[in-house]
Image (cartoon, rainbow, N blue to C red):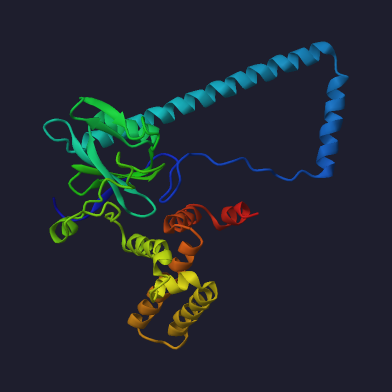
Amino acid sequence: MEAAALARLSLPGVGVGGGGGGGGGGVAFPVSRGRLLAVKEKKKQQLHAPISASTSASASASASASASASASASAGNEEALRYDSKVETLLDSVKWDNKGLVVAIAQNVDTGAILMQGFANREALATTILSRKATFFSRSRSSLWTKGETSKNFINVLDIFLDCDRDSIIYLGKPDGPTCHTGAETCYYSSVHDQLEGPKPNQDWLAATTLQSLEATISRRKEEIEEAQNRKPSWTKKLLLDKELLCSKVREEAGELVQTLLEGEDRSRTASEMADLLYHSMVLLTAKDVKIEEVLEVLRRRFARSGIEEKNSRK
């Protein structure tokens, strides 16, 4: 397969890092006191109008509402037909193999971790687009299946990507729980390097990003704290045992990062100081039992909506 251009398929009502679901809420507009009094007076006049006029007005309003509803339904049907046509065109453009399948990979939208790999046919991809749940085609059962239909650990799809050759797809989504049937976070936990170098693969060593791997290492140090009572602790363990020391290091590293800008230091120095700040900040997160995935999810949600909406959500 050739190199890495991606063709993006945007789902309806979903933004770049958005969290599923279309349409926004209603907006309340201010009404002046004078306007309210005018409305009340009009209501009063309507109450004293002849019954026949009232009946005629009601019939007219009913007919108008019916016509409006009919027009709205017609517009909605036209929009649905246009969308269905776009989906069919998209499905026609996929390079299905001789069995009508493509490789379908599920990826965590926040961490970037590869969750699982399966196969999808035309119906599975169409179902995923409409339901926003990662759906695959089982070659052994010759039927569709949705990840989570038994375990309830669904993968909620926020976006779908086609590769440059249009013969494989990525379901980019948020898992509701562990993806692997073994209970592991992803199906990729067997390191070839570990198997070649050691006698026993480590199931906790996931195919993870650098930040996730660092988080896993820090978490292991936290678990080992009790075992370190009789020997000199590592720097990470020392930080976890001393909150004042940890907080002072986070402040110190933040200050040193800022200085690289103020003093015009080179790029490598800035990268080094940022790495120090990230490390100490992640130790603090571990001390608070906060996972880096939670932080990444907050960032995704913030950048998926306007600053005003974000500020309002904090009230």
Indicate the quadrant containing the C terminus: top left, top right, bottom left or bottom right: bottom right
Please give the name of the residue rendered at 25% of the width and 54% of the height, measured from the top-left corner: 202
Q: Is residue 52 above or below residue 305?
A: above
| Residue 125 percent location from the top left of the image | 28, 34
Judged left or right of residue 242, residue 52 is right
Residue 103 vs residue 225, the one in the foreground = 225
Please give the name of the residue rendered at 43% of the width and 48% of the height, measured from the top-left corner: 15
Q: Is residue 49 above or below residue 165?
A: above
Judged left or right of residue 5, residue 160 is right
Judged left or right of residue 214, residue 74 is right
Please say whether residue 88 is visible from this viewpoint: no
| Residue 179 percent location from the top left of the image | 33, 42
| Residue 111 percent location from the top left of the image | 36, 55
Residue 253 vs residue 315, the one in the foreground = 253
Residue 290 vs residue 110, the one in the foreground = 290
Residue 233 vs residue 178, the one in the foreground = 233
| Residue 193 percent location from the top left of the image | 17, 59
Please say whether residue 239 is visible from this viewpoint: yes
Judged left or right of residue 112, residue 141 is left
